[in-house]
Amino acid sequence: MALAGIRVIELAGLAPAPFCGMILADFGASVIRVDRTKAAMALDTQARGKRSVALNLKTPEGVGILKKLCVQSDVVLEPYRKGVMEKLGLGPEKLLKENPGLIYARLTGYGQSGPYATAAGHDINYLAMSGLLSRLGRHGDKPYSPLNLVADFAGGGLTCAFGIVLALLERTRSGQGQVIDASMVEGAAYVGSFIWKSRAIGMWERGRGQNMLDSGAPFYDTYRTADGKHVAVGAIEPQFYLQLLRGLGLDATDLPPQMSPDGWPELRRVFEGCFATKTQAEWSQIFDGTDACVTPVLSFDQVSSHPHNKERGSFVRDPGEEESPRPAPVLSRTPADPCLDRDPRIGQHTREVLEEYGFKSHDVERLLAAGAIEHNVPEAKL
């Protein structure tokens, strides 16, 4: 796999950092998640392919172990607020002195500088600060956050993984590591570059929810079908729009002009009435094989059985029958090969990893007895 041989130390966190670690693991990196001892349960639901080491970072021994793991690895993925690692004596300046080739990725909401650098926040706050939240929502309604996808995962975890891969690539030329300052505010804003840069051509001159791509246009929206399900319509180009009308049994000469916003409310009423006359499956039968840009809004229960996704193997199942998306993109020579084993228990691999990093068996026993580490063996499967 593309990242085979890369060692990653991921300090346990929530959502964005675990997603970043899972991406790296899916594409072949050896990702070790560092958990705290005495934790009731792992909150990482994106632990696919990772191993877990449990350390007591309130002890000098625990901190010393973490330091040894970090300086013998290629990447450190750190999701804490600014200053936390420095208090442990494990900031990037110290670690890079011992391992000049280390990639130290710091994934935070507001970045490592500025008045908000130490402030708490969540996806909705970062999205608000990026400017994007002001553009999301229906006309006449308040801004809404589309789950926690844009800042946490697109602007956070995915952007950070991209930064790590860039730094690894650059290291092949310079031999030097570096620090990655991944801010979810800036990552979300960067993901939204199209919106920023397309303002110049008038795409967003109307208010929120009144433009072509933000639910303002009736030919770029979702519609309820006769069985209470929905279809998505994205028929922007004239040739696609004509195929949409043909499938709906409508004549363009009887309707307001497609690109006239003044006529959009009437056009929407017509489309709503049409789509309500048939089921989602019936509309799929009509539009499949056309370029009308009409697709079913698939539920999680439906998505893997759809013929297109099924043929491509776009979703995978683990031994417990839990379904999840296959890693993307697909590489022709070194594709991802996601581990489908059960997610690791906290501390499941402590002994194995420490011995791999040079600790002797008697050292591990001593650290266990001192409470500096924790090793939890999974329950036997009956």
Image (cartoon, rainbow, N blue to C red):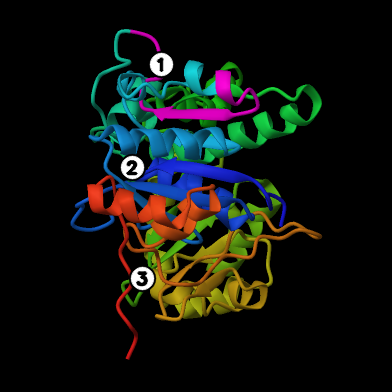
Q: Which residues are magenta?
A: 97-114
Residue 241 visible in the picture: yes
Callout 1 crowding tier (Cα within 10 Å): few <14, some 14–19, many ≥20: some
Where does the image place residue 366, in percent across and percent down from the top left?
A: 32, 51
Q: Count the marks: how many? A: 3
Badge 3 amino acid:
Lys
Where does the image place residue 267, in percent across and percent down from the top left?
A: 44, 49
Front: mark 3 or 1: 1
User: Residue at horizontal 32%, vertical 44%?
Assistant: 14
Seen in the image, is 126 located left or right of residue 250?
Answer: left
Instruction: Check if residue 100 falls in the magenta segment.
Output: yes
* Residues tagged 3 and 1 counted as in contact (Cβ below 8 A): no
Residue highlighted by disc 3? 229
50 lies above or below 124: below
User: Residue at horizontal 64%, vertical 46%?
Assistant: 6
Q: Quadrant of residue 88?
A: top left
Q: Which mark is residue 112?
A: 1
Q: Nearer the viewer, residue 4 or 220?
A: 4
Residue highlighted by disc 2? 13
* Residues tagged 3 and 2 counted as in contact (Cβ below 8 A): no
Dot 2: what SS? loop
Where does the image place residue 25, in percent across and percent down from the top left?
A: 56, 54
Q: Quadrant of residue 269?
A: bottom left
269 lies above or below 152: below
Where does the image place residue 369, in percent across and percent down from the top left?
A: 25, 53
Instruction: Check if residue 216 falls in the magenta segment.
Output: no
Front: mark 3 or 2: 2
User: Residue at horizontal 57%, vertical 39%?
Assistant: 73
Image quadrant containing the N terminus:
bottom right
